Image (cartoon, rainbow, N blue to C red):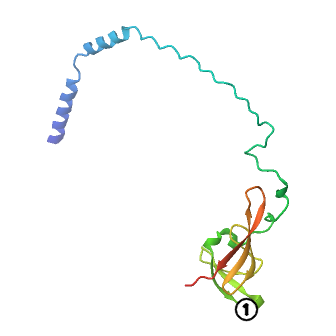
Amino acid sequence: MNARSMILAGLSAAVLAGCAQDTQQVEAWVAEVRARPAQPLDPLPPLQTFPAYEYSSQGLRDPFAAPQNSREAAGPRPDPNRRKEALEAFPLDALRMVGTIGDGGGIVALVLAPDKVTHRVRSGNYLGQSDGRVVRIGPERIDMVELVSDGSGGWMERQATLALEDN
């Protein structure tokens, strides 16, 4: 062993030897405290009574249930059986119209998705996450009709456009 280790071992033994003093005083104090009678507990406060409340809205509609009205069946609705197209995975504001191909009735729009893939879009295709159906493609914009919830269980059509960006 080197000198440092020996000095450290000697100091540790001296410190531990100081801890082995007479503990009779501490043990006597602990016994005295345990022998004292316990303090009495405070009595419980009296129970407070509340007036009864009569719920008078038994026959009304449950505010947490979905509304049941005749508007649900009428009007436009998204087709749950329609196969989703690739550009419906992205929000409309994330899509960019970057150009067109063709002219007249055979015009095709070029739309850049956030995954950096350019897609060809024709009338009748769907874009965005709100069932946006393309109704017209012009040289500088795509006109769509989206289906959005009206907040009461029905759906309404909303016009939307995707314009060609100037770079």
Q: Element under label 1?
A: loop
- Relative to 138, say whether 58 is above or below: above
Of all residues, the one furthest to the bottom in this rendering is 103
101 and 67: which one is in front? 67
Q: Amino acid at mark 1?
A: Asp
Residue 139, image quadrant: bottom right
Q: Residue at the spot x=80%, y=68% of the render?
A: 82
Residue 30 x, y percent position in the rendering: 33, 14
- Relative to 13, say whether 158 is above or below: below
Residue 126, image quadrant: bottom right
Q: Residue at the spot x=76%, y=46% of the render?
A: 65
Tell me the residue that label 1 is attached to.
Answer: 103
- Relative to 102, say whether 90 is above or below: above
Residue 48, image quadrant: top right
Q: Quadrant of the N terminus?
A: top left
Residue 163 x, y percent position in the rendering: 64, 80
